[in-house]
Amino acid sequence: MDQFSQSGSFQNLLNNQHPNTSFSFLTREPSVDLSSSDASVFGAHWADDGKEDEVVVSDRKERRKWTPTEDTVLIGAWLNTSKDPVVGNEQKTIAFWKRIAFYVASSPKLSDLQKREPSHCKQRWGKINEGVCKFVGCYGAATKAKSSGMNEDDVLKMAHEIFFINL
């Protein structure tokens, strides 16, 4: 008899792939044998030498904060790169962020600063974009709450208040 013709045999096959871990596809409850000495179940290999708290950072550079000028150049680089009619969206993510990092590095406004890596530009853009999206939502709420006699400056002030209250 074929081993795959029985009902649930695929689940049993998947559940038996790792001897110390299992996931029951029928109950959707994970189970791990915690008495096992195999730490690879959790995706990391730890040495049991009593030095768990010791952290070695060898190749790590000092963290630099982004300046408002760098933020402005990064925003301009993102806009120019993402709206490029020649390349368009026919590029891989890493190529896109390498182009942005190159654009930022070649800016005359930042010539005296250390160059940023593409991953740093991507992370910073994520933070900027998150704040912008949040402010757009606050501006929409302020526009809906606009009362008679309020002008656009009043709406903008209300949007700022909503934004900073919800930080």
Image: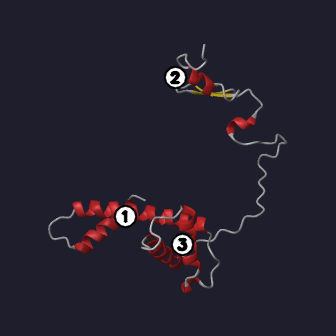
> Where is 131 relative to 48, above or below?
below
Quadrant containing the C terminus in the rendered view: bottom left
* Secondary structure state at the residue bearing disc 2: loop
**Rendered location of residue 152, percent (x, y):** 24, 73
Q: Amino acid at mark 2?
A: Leu
| Contact check, label 3 and label 2, Cβ < 8 Å | no
Distance of label 1 from label 3 (alpha carbons): 24 Å
* Crowd class of label 2 (few under 14; some 14 to 19; many from 20; radius 10 Å): few
The label number, if any, that marks residue 26 in the structure image: 2
Q: Amino acid at mark 3?
A: Ile
Distance of label 1 from label 2 (alpha carbons): 44 Å
* Secondary structure state at the residue bearing disc 1: helix
Residue furthest right in the image = 49
At horizontal 57% and vertical 73% (from top left) the residue drawn is 101
Q: Earlier in the sequence, mark 1 or mark 3?
A: 3
**Rendered location of residue 113, percent (x, y):** 63, 81
**Rendered location of residue 134, percent (x, y):** 39, 60
